[in-house]
Image (cartoon, rainbow, N blue to C red):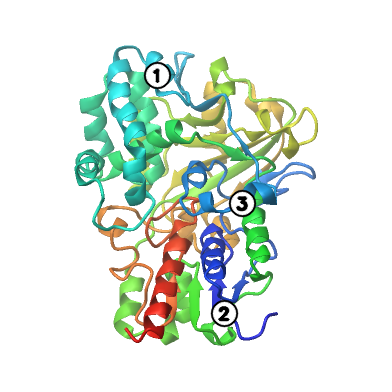
Amino acid sequence: MASNPDAVVVGSGPNGLAAAIVLARAGRKVIVFEADRTIGGGARSAELTLPGFIHDVCSAIHPFAILSPIFRTMPLASHGLEWIEPPAMLAHPLDDGGAAIADRSVERTAESLGDDAAAYRRVFGTLEENWPRLEPTVLGQLRMPRHPFVLARFGLQALRSAEGFAQRAFRDVRTRALFAGLAAHGMLPLDATLTAGFGLVLGATLHVAGWRLPRGGAQRLSDALAAHLRSLGGEIVAGTRVASLDDLPPSRAVLCDLSPRPFLHVAGHRLPASFRRRLERYRYGMGAFKVDWALDAPIPWRAPACARAATVHLGGTWEEVARSERDAWDGRTAARPFVLLVQPTLFDPTRAPAGRHTVWTYCHVPHASTADMLPAIEQQIERFAPGFRERVIAKSVMSPADIERHNPNLVGGDIGAGVSDLRQVFARPTWRTHATPVRGLYLCSAATPPGVGVHGMCGALAAERATRFRRARARGV
C-alpha cells in the first residue's frame, strides 16, 4: 500500500472510481478501499446461476455511461471496454400480441406509433436536438444554465407528473405504455411530481446514445475504470471493509462512495449532531426484487419484435404500470408487478455457453419487503412469452435484504440509493450535497447530485470540489 496518500476513496463503485481518477489526474496520490473482493459496486458481474453464465449483479443497461461527461474523457476502450448496441433499444409488449418498440431513431419509433407519431417526434425529437444544452444540468450540478430558455421549457415538462404529461401528450395505448415504463424507472408513483422528468430523460437517452450493454457484462466497465486509475498511479485495495474513518491512513481528503446510512456507520462519530440528524432523515424508497435466469434457449416472445431489444418492459397498459408502482410505494405487493427485463445474450454470446442464455429481471416492491415475488415475475414473463418456464435451467433470486447485503448503499433494496422526489433531488442528501461540515470529508455516492445512474458524475463532481478546496487553501483564499 502506498504511504501518505493525498486522498482516500471508500467504495469502488463507478462513482468512487471516477472520483479517484479525477483526483489522480490532478496529481494526487489516491487509494481506493473496497469491502468486497470484487470491485464495481453497482456495476459488477458474477456467475449467479451456473458456471459459465455471467449475470449482472445490479446495473445491466448503461445509457448514462455512454453520455457521461467524465467517462468520455477516459480511454476506457483501450482498457478493454466494448459497447454493444442492440437493433432496438426497448420493447414493451401488450396483450394483443403486439409491442411498442423504441428504435435508436426518433423517426422510426414515431412511425410505429400511429396517431401519436407527430407527438412523439415533437417531444423526443426536440429533446434529442437539445440534449447538448440540457446535458450539463441533467448530468451535472445545479447552477446557472448557459441555455436558460431551453432548460426552462424542459423544466416545465419535467416537473410535472408522468400521468399528467402522458394524458396531454399521447393518445395511443402503445405510446402511453412505453412512457409509463420509462417513467417507472424513477421508483415513484406515476402521479407524483417530477416523474415526467424521468420518462423524458430516459426517453431521450434511447435516441441520443442508445441503451447499450458492455460486452462481457457490467464488470467490464468497472474493470476498465480500475485499469485506467492504476495507469495514473492510483491504488485499489479490495476485500478490506472500512468500519470507521479512524481505520484509514492519514490523508488530506476522504471521499465516501456511500449512501447516508452506511456513511453514518463509518463517519457518524466525526460529524456534528445537527448534520447527523439531517442524514438520519434521508429517505430511502421502494425496494427491488431481482431474479436472474439461465435458459437453454431464447425467451419465446409472442411478439417477435421483442427479440430485437436487449431491454423489455413487462407491465401491460399505462394503468397497470401505474397501479404496480403505486402499490409498491404504498406498501402493498402488486399482483401484476411492472417487470424490467434484460436479455443480454441475444447480442452478447460471451456471457453464456453456446446456445444458452441469461436473463436479468427485477420488479419494484415496498421498502425492505419480505414478499416472494418470484411467482408473480414468472407469470408476467409467461403472459407475454408462453413457454418461458420450460426453458429455465437455473435461477438466482435476490430479495431486498439480499440486495442490501450485496451493496449496503442500497438500503432496504432501494437500487436508487434514496428517493428522488422534488424534496430530495435538489438537496441530495442535504443542501451541502457532496460536502460535509468536516474539512476534507466528502460524499460521492448516488445519494449526491446528479443522482442515480452509472455515469460517475457524483464522484467526479465531489472530487472536483475537493481539489478546488485544496487549491483555494493553498492560495490562502
Residue beneath disc 1: 107
In the image, is residue 315 above or below residue 417? Answer: above
Going from N to C along the chain, the mark reached first, 1 or 2, is 1
Residue visible at 59% across and 22% down? 307
In the image, is residue 94 above or below residue 285? Answer: above
Q: Specify whether 36 is left or right of 429.
A: right
CA distance for labels 3 and 1: 32 Å
Frontmost residue, 408 versus 120: 120
> In the picture, residue 391 is in which quadrant?
top right
Q: Specify whether 216 is left or right of 159.
A: right
Q: Position of residue 76 (x, y in %)?
A: 62, 50
Residue visible at 38% across and 35% down? 204
CA distance for labels 1 and 2: 52 Å
Q: Nearer the viewer, mark 1 or mark 2?
A: 1
Residue visible at 37% across and 16% down? 113
Residue beneath disc 3: 75
Q: In the structure shown, which secondary structural element does the residue marked by tag 3 occupy? A: loop
Q: Are marks 3 and 2 in contact (CB under 8 Å)?
A: no
Q: Are marks 3 and 1 in contact (CB under 8 Å)?
A: no
Q: In the structure shown, which secondary structural element does the residue marked by tag 2 occupy? A: loop
Frontmost residue, 408 versus 217: 217
Residue beneath disc 2: 243
Frontmost residue, 325 versus 51: 51
